[in-house]
Image: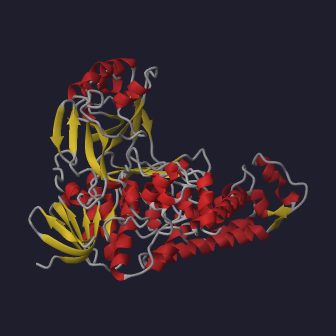
Amino acid sequence: MDFKYDVIVIGGGHAGCEAAAAAANLGSRTCLVTMDMNKIAQMSCNPAVGGIAKGQIVREIDALGGFMGIVTDKTSLQFRMLNRSKGPAMWSPRAQCDRGKYIWEWRKILDNTDNLTIWQDTVREIIVEDGEVRGVVTDFDVTMRAKCVIVTAGTFLNGLMHVGRVKLQGGRVAEPSSLHLTESITRHGIRHGRMKTGTPVRIDARSVHFEDMEVQEGENDFHSFSFMSDGERQLKQLNCWTCFTNPEAHKVLNEGLPESPLYNGQIQSIGPRYCPSIETKIVTFPDKEQHQLFLEPEGETSNELYLNGFSSSLPLRIQLEALRCIPAFREVVAYRPGYAIEYDFFDPTQLLHTLESKVVKNLFFAGQVNGTTGYEEAAGQGLIAGINAHINCHGGKPFVLGRDQAYIGVLIDDLVTKGVDEPYRMFTSRAEYRILLRQDDSDIRLTPLSRELGLASRERVERMEKKHTEIERITSYVSSYSIKPNLINDALQSLGTTPLRQGCKLIDLLERPQITIKNLAPFIPAFARELEKINERREEIIEATEIKIKYAGYIDRERMIADRNSRLENIRIKGKFDYSSIQSLSTEARQKLTRIDPETIGQASRIPGISPSDINVLLVLSGR
């Protein structure tokens, strides 16, 4: 059997699937090596996709020609748009998915992707010759040769699970760890560390008293994750539920802390600040009498439920005793306990923005091995790594997204510039240009870039172009259509806004917060007829047009700031200076600039500890 490829991807999680699909669809002969072909894109924790800022990442993956959004729409059990009470820069789609169907939708895609082979095995060693990766060796003692290798091993590298004082080797429950790959990588000078994450107990729905919980319904409007979807929900839509912990449950948890691996010294690694365990919550917030819990379905026909907010590594008996203090769970039955897992990651400051290693040529890293947490962050990295691995094989300009282009660009720049001291999770607050990075226009922002790469399908490009054309047409229409007070004032009063004293353009009315395209159009027949000309995706196009009109000032101002700041991004400094010899830089700056070796002054300015005066020194030395 011929084991020679352009690209080998190690690991079949969310990063690995996107990386393998991207490289193969671009034309690289690709092999995805995974421990279990039946758990491709397994959702190790909550079977949910999206959320605050994460939903924007999935939209971006979709706009670039990835598949996470498509698979999510096909397997969604409940869809919601979060943060609707805030401005559109904060709107974030989220979907609860059917865990099993999600796997098989991904498997169907990969099985039918040209240039892509799946091999079930475990990689134990990377082959490096003359500072360049040449392939891998597996546990079946198979040697595979490749021009590029992408490591997307998730939590499997020396994975160790904890339930109370019980310790089990594994990458997730019932799946083995990868025990030798970390050592194979670090012997080439790549730094690594340990992190931890956790997951909650899984609950049998038949044991829950739903009457003691509040129902959380989904939404059935036109919104979806993929711009290739038609908005129709393909599976039965299910409810989620919410309730709260109480002082009785907290008392049980507190008494069990001596048996918690987090507090008895058993776990020493770094955990996620923004997704803490229930024991961390009661220790960090001792005066808080309750914490909200979300009970969410794992499948369309399954009784298995996910208890979001109750991640724990306490012994099972303590987890269940605490839960039974909560009315809804007074007779709770569990499928399996919550557990914590420790795993290896690699220092992402040793990566280029393409996610290629600075230490070993053509070796890429993506996903949790870079110190991130979350399926979405992993998938976004996998897509970029897959694209750039293909480019390294066949030639072309490196594909890098800027901070003003995509949340994926923010994510990767944060990783390679700042590094991580805890599992990295994306938030809208991390993006300084978030009004430019809205979920509603990801296709218009990024599909043209995907088209240039050759990754976006013709259908995707045509849909994007039609949407853009319709938005521009409606915007032009309302910008030129004049309205007189006597024709619209009664309508304005009924909509709760001030009547006109003189005529104005329709766009001026749409800038008012009380006015929307939908509530105004019935009063202006010509405008309503214009909207009726939209043949496809009418609601999506109307929403995107309205956002563009109402927030035009903010969008223009943020674009001006981004363009001004891009000056620093265009001043390249990589390899130009011996930072250790520049005495006018601070000691911290010399050390960090030497270690990270930033590509540009813009990147240098975002390194923690680099002061404005240090940047001025670099500008002077650059002749600027």
Q: Residue furthest left?
A: 140
The quarter of the rendered structure image containing the N terminus is bottom left
Q: Is residue 360 visible?
A: yes
Residue depicted at x 69% and y 55%: 516
Q: What's the coloring here? A: secondary structure
The quarter of the rendered structure image containing the C terminus is bottom right
Where residue 368 appears, x then y in whole percent?
A: 33, 53
Residue depicted at x 38% and y 72%: 387
Q: Which of 535 and 387 is in front in this view?
A: 387
Horizontally, residue 467 falls left or right of residue 319, namely: right
Where residue 16 appears, x then y in whole percent?
A: 30, 62
Horizontally, residue 198 falls left or right of residue 221, namely: left
Residue depicted at x 50% and y 74%: 449
Where residue 348 appears, x then y in whole percent?
A: 38, 56
Asked where in the image residue 309 lies, by quadrant, the reply is top left
Where residue 479 appears, x then y in whole percent?
A: 76, 68
Above or below for 207 versus 10: above
Q: Nearer the viewer, residue 574 or 229?
A: 574
Q: Can residue 441 be seen in this view?
A: no
